[in-house]
Amino acid sequence: MSVRRARDLVMSYGWNSTCYQILNPGIEHWFPSTIPAVVGYTRRHRLLLVAGAPVCAPEMLGRVSHEFEAFAHQQGCRVCYVCAEERLRSLFADSTSHATITLGAQPVWDPRNWQATVEGTSAIRAQLNRSRNKSVSVEAVSAEEAAREPELRRVLNEWLRARRLPPLHFLVSPHVLEGDGSDRVVLVAKHGGRLVAYLVASPVVAKEGYLVELLARSPSAPNGTSELLIDNAMRRFAEYDKSYATLGLVALSNSAAKGIRNNPLWLRSMMQFARLHANRFYNFRGLEHFRVKMSPRVWEPVYAISNEKHFSPSTLYSMGAAFSGISPLVAIGTGIMHAIGNELRGRVGKSGVGKSGVGKSGVGKSG
């Protein structure tokens, strides 16, 4: 009942790009008593982490936020709005009891102009031609059918095994088809009759658009498969006369450099270190390069906003725990061990073993 009620509100008022993701498993819902609104959140110790922003009419945003923070205070908790966007940042811009940091930025397209984008971007055309030359095909399936399809689970598992960190949670969970997905768009890519990749997009009703929240591909997928899925998604959104599409947050994005410079010094230092040294665990640069190649119309900054005077390291730690599902220190340690294993396997491959096919997983293809 809670999810159904939340879904109705999301499909009426959802504005933040992450709005539909509050219907994913593991997200709790809070409803004010007298206002049509919902807040999706998860709890980490004494912090309630909101998935994006409250879902409500824009004129009610301040009141709903105030009531939710009062609800949190009654439980001895603070609040942090994670992956919030400009509407909420503007609301708290003059607040002395809220601290805002810039996490990164998300690329945005107008699907109605996608054909012109393709015609004007040789990198996109080249990747699309590669996938088409390999006879990769794309078709739509219902979210209900996708949730039951074992081939999608196989692709997801292959994709996750190729990544450097354990699966993430909260707003970046890869298991998006396990929740209420009746409004989602699901596209699958096939090569030689075998499913090799799929894309899941969720509606952002108040922006007349979609968030591409998951794009999973098998290492065996031909180059250009990801681009072909995005191309098909954009054309479908245009057929729906949608004016907004995003591929979601790119943490530490260069496009958010101005906002990141306003973060606290300790956080700027951590972000700079992560940008320089953490790429072996999480492909920040690769994610951004892929999105830049797709020629977005604009990059929108994405924030975390906490109801404290200064954004604290403990809040950042709790955010990390929500995304990793475990202690961030354990997650980093696991990533380090995974990276060491990959590097050792790479050295074995360079010594000649790879010539027989060992180690040629296909990971690293641009599409």
Image (cartoon, rainbow, N blue to C red):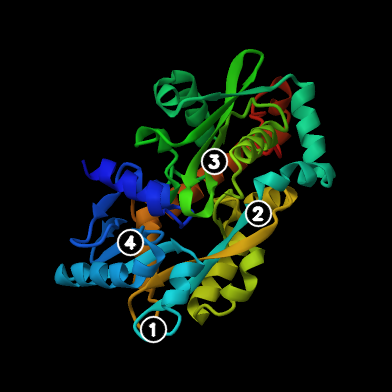
Q: Which residue corresponds to mark 4?
A: 49
Marks 4 and 2: in contact by CB < 8 Å? no
- 343 horizontally vs 315: left or right: right
Q: Position of residue 283 (x, y in %)?
A: 60, 50
First in sequence, mark 3 or 1: give its number: 1
Query: What amino acid type should be assigned to the residue bearing mark 2?
Result: Glu
Of the numbered discs in the image, which one, if any, rests on residue 95? 1
**Within 10 angstroms of label 3, few (less than 14), some, or many (20 or more) residues?**
few
Give the SS element for disc 4: strand
Q: Closer to the camera: disc 4 or disc 3?
A: 4
Nearer to us in this view, 206 or 218: 206
Nearer to us in this view, 350 or 86: 86
- 254 horizontally vs 200: left or right: right
Q: Closer to the camera: disc 3 or disc 1?
A: 1
CA gap between label 4 and label 1 equals 19 Å
Query: What amino acid type should be assigned to the residue bearing mark 3?
Result: Gly
Query: What amino acid type should be assigned to the residue bearing mark 1?
Result: Ser
Q: Position of residue 90 (x, y in %)?
A: 47, 75
Q: Closer to the camera: disc 3 or disc 2?
A: 2
Give the SS element for disc 3: helix
First in sequence, mark 4 or 3: give its number: 4
Q: Residue at x 65, y 54 (%)?
A: 288
Give the SS element for disc 2: helix
Q: Residue at x 19, y 67 (%)?
A: 71
CA gap between label 1 and label 2 equals 32 Å
First in sequence, mark 4 or 1: give its number: 4
Q: Position of residue 293 (x, y in %)?
A: 74, 49
**Within 10 angstroms of label 4, few (less than 14), some, or many (20 or more) residues?**
many
Of the numbered discs in the image, which one, if any, rests on residue 269? none
Q: Which residue corresponds to mark 3?
A: 341
Give the SS element for disc 1: loop
